[in-house]
Image: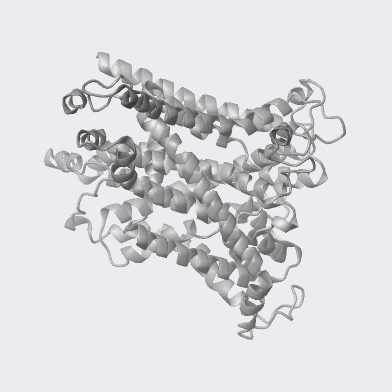
């Protein structure tokens, strides 16, 4: 197994499958029974259960139990009280996805086309920082962006930041943390797409008098689109629901919807509210993903 | 121009100066384009290593108070000699390893079977299954964690939240990634190799064990490694399903509230080093065997 294999497989698409043979048709479904059962019991069932919880009467409590009253009102309360958190989460996630794309594309491009014999070495370097714990990385960003850290000093010297300016506890810090943590999820799929690209197509484009910018715009980028699509999904989805970065690098003023769900579930134990928030988040993300996949024209994702 | 580029081989990285009719300005533009991307790539790489440098440096820091802070104080190797001193840290690491190993084995087994069933067989409900496998990946972790917790509570399992429930949750979010990884490998495989084996009078089992399995194995190994790293590093889902058990990410999170010991940075450094040596070693070994293969 090499890093390149992993990257290619993460991107999720490959050359077309050989047609399954008729002979195997009878017993093929036996293979999927255990996995399918697992998904039904531990994914489908909990989701239905969550849907049920979201409709409980909010006047119940954890100790005395809840009454099922089809309390659709929960959703209205959940949305109207937390609309700013939803908007902030999706806003942050959108910025994060965009910046990740801007950072990851040149990196993946450089690895595939410009690194020569250092290609695999560079790919290892892309993944290497992400072997340490996610929380430790975020903690060390806390140190880097701290008020007395060199980044803040530098920005103050250049004049970007005022004398009392700070990075920690601002949206900038939260977004920067998210960008850092989800960068490899963008880089690897794009790498895989570019790596599969036939270099002769790029040569053909320059033979036909396209300048490098036109080649990138009309040939390279469109051909790497499957990787860009998987990358944006693998970045956007977890970024929407993340609450660790907002908690470590921000203040309650930067909290995202994940923080609210976590608090409602584990601190306030207000299960109907937490469940309706979860369902709303899940539905919005799903709608966005489906719309995006349709627009991007990727027919099979898994 | 056309003659110049045609002579280039497909694998060249186009770093040699372009030949043919081209103005000096064009050549400079070309050079800038060629190298600016490499430079940008290296810059992005350097950026990803900044926190790692911090973690390594802080593992040698003598904290000024009882808890480690971000402030550099004094060089010491104390943290490295007293790794397991902080209460509960090493037991949390042990639990993390147990959870990840169990979850990896289960998810890889279930996921590989699913991948085979999906890539190689036609049956009713294939499309629905594909969607069911994609859904967990499109579910934010908070939602997955909270819905599992709701299920465990409703199922009367709230008393036994711990190892079992963490493993159940980890298998769930690893499963889809395993299926995607193994399936990509399976569909990328040349099906004619199996047909050839069958033509040469291998029975189904021989074909599977001598042809199919060796070819798919790298994909399964990749999937297992991915599952392990996802599981080992998971915080959000674990936080919901762990009850009173503490995995390593949960330990860091809990320690953050009351001040964390400097030894967590030692563990962070070690994790980075072990993984780095492992992956880098695999890469060197691959290069060496490729070289030997070419020679023979």
Most extreme residue toward the top is B295
Residue B216 appears in the figure: no
Judging from the image, the colouring scheme is one colour
Instruction: Indicate the position of residue A84 as horizontal and vertical percent values.
Output: 65, 66
Instruction: Indicate the position of residue A67 as horizontal and vertical percent values.
Output: 68, 83
Camera-side residue of B158 and A154: A154
Q: Is the C terminus of chain B in the top left, top right, bottom left or bottom right quadrant?
A: top left
Camera-side residue of B209 and B217: B217
* Figure check: A277 above or below B30: below
Most extreme residue toward the bottom is A69
Q: Is residue A229 left or right of residue A183?
A: left
Q: Quadrant of residue A280?
A: bottom right
* Figure check: B234 above or below A197: below
Which residue is at a point 62% across and 60% down the rendered structure image? A88
* Figure check: B6 above or below A169: above
Instruction: Indicate the position of residue A132 as horizontal and vertical percent values.
Output: 61, 35
Residue B167 appears in the figure: yes
Q: Is residue A160 left or right of residue B223?
A: right
Which residue is at a point 40% across and 52% down the rendered structure image? A229
Camera-side residue of A227 and B60: A227
Which residue is at a point 29% across and 36% down the rendered structure image? A211
Q: Is the N terminus of chain B in the top left, top right, bottom left or bottom right quadrant?
A: top left
């Amino acid at each position: 197994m090499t890093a390149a294999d992993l990257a290619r497989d993460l991107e999720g698409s490959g050359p077309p499958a050989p047609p399954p043979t008729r002979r195997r048709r009878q017993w093929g479904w036996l293979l999927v029974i255990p996995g399918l059962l697992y998904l039904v019991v531990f994914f489908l069932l909990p989701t239905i259960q969550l849907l049920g919880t979201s409709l409980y009467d909010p006047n119940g409590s954890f100790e005395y139990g809840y009454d099922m009253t089809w309390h659709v009102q929960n959703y209205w309360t959940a949305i109207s009280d937390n609309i700013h958190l939803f908007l902030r989460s999706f806003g942050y996630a959108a910025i994060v996805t965009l910046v990740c794309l801007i950072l990851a594309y040149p990196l993946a491009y450089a690895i595939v086309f410009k690194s020569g014999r250092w290609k695999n070495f560079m790919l290892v370097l892309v993944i290497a920082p992400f072997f340490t714990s996610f929380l430790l990385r975020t903690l060390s960003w806390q140190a880097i962006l701290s008020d007395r850290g060199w980044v803040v000093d530098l920005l103050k010297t250049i004049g970007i930041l005022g004398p009392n300016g700070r990075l920690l506890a601002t949206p900038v810090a939260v977004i920067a943390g998210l960008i850092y943590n989800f960068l490899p999820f963008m880089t690897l799929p794009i790498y895989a797409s570019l790596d599969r690209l036939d270099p002769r197509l790029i040569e053909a484009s320059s033979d036909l008098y396209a300048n490098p910018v036109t080649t990138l715009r009309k040939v390279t980028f469109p051909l790497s689109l499957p990787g860009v699509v998987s990358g944006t999904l693998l970045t956007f989805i977890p970024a929407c629901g993340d609450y660790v970065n907002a908690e470590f690098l921000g203040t309650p003023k930067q909290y995202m919807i994940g923080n609210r769900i976590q608090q409602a579930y584990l601190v306030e134990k207000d299960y109907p509210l937490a469940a309706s928030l979860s369902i709303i988040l899940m539905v919005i993300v799903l709608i966005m993903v489906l719309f995006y996949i349709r627009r991007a024209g990727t027919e099979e994702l898994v | 121009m056309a003659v110049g580029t045609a002579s280039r081989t497909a694998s060249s990285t186009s770093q040699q100066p372009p030949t043919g009719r081209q103005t000096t300005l064009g050549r400079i533009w070309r050079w800038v384009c060629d190298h600016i991307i490499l430079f940008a790539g290296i810059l992005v790489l350097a950026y990803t290593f900044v926190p790692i440098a911090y973690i390594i440096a802080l593992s040698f820091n003598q904290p000024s108070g009882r808890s480690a802070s971000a402030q550099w104080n004094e060089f010491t190797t104390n943290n490295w000699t007293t790794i397991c001193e902080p209460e509960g840290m090493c037991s949390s690491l042990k639990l993390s390893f147990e959870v990840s190993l169990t979850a990896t084995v289960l998810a890889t087994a279930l996921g590989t079977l699913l991948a085979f069933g999906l890539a190689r067989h036609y049956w009713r409900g294939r499309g629905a299954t594909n969607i069911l496998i994609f859904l967990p990946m499109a579910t934010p972790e908070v939602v997955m964690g909270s819905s599992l917790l709701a299920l465990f509570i409703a199922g009367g399992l709230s008393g036994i939240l711990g190892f079992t429930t963490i493993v159940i949750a980890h298998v769930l979010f690893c499963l889809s990634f395993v299926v995607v990884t193994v399936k990509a490998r399976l569909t990328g495989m040349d099906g004619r190799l199996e047909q050839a084996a069958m033509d040469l009078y291998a029975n189904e089992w021989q074909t599977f064990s001598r042809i199919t399995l060796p070819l798919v194995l790298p994909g399964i190994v990749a999937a297992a490694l991915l599952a392990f790293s996802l599981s080992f590093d998971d915080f959000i889902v674990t936080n919901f399903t762990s009850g009173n058990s503490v995995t390593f990410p949960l330990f860091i999170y809990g320690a953050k509230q009351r001040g964390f010991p400097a030894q967590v940075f030692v563990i962070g450094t070690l994790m980075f080093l072990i993984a780095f040596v492992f992956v880098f070693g695999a890469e060197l070994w691959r290069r060496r065997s490729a070289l030997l293969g070419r020679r023979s």
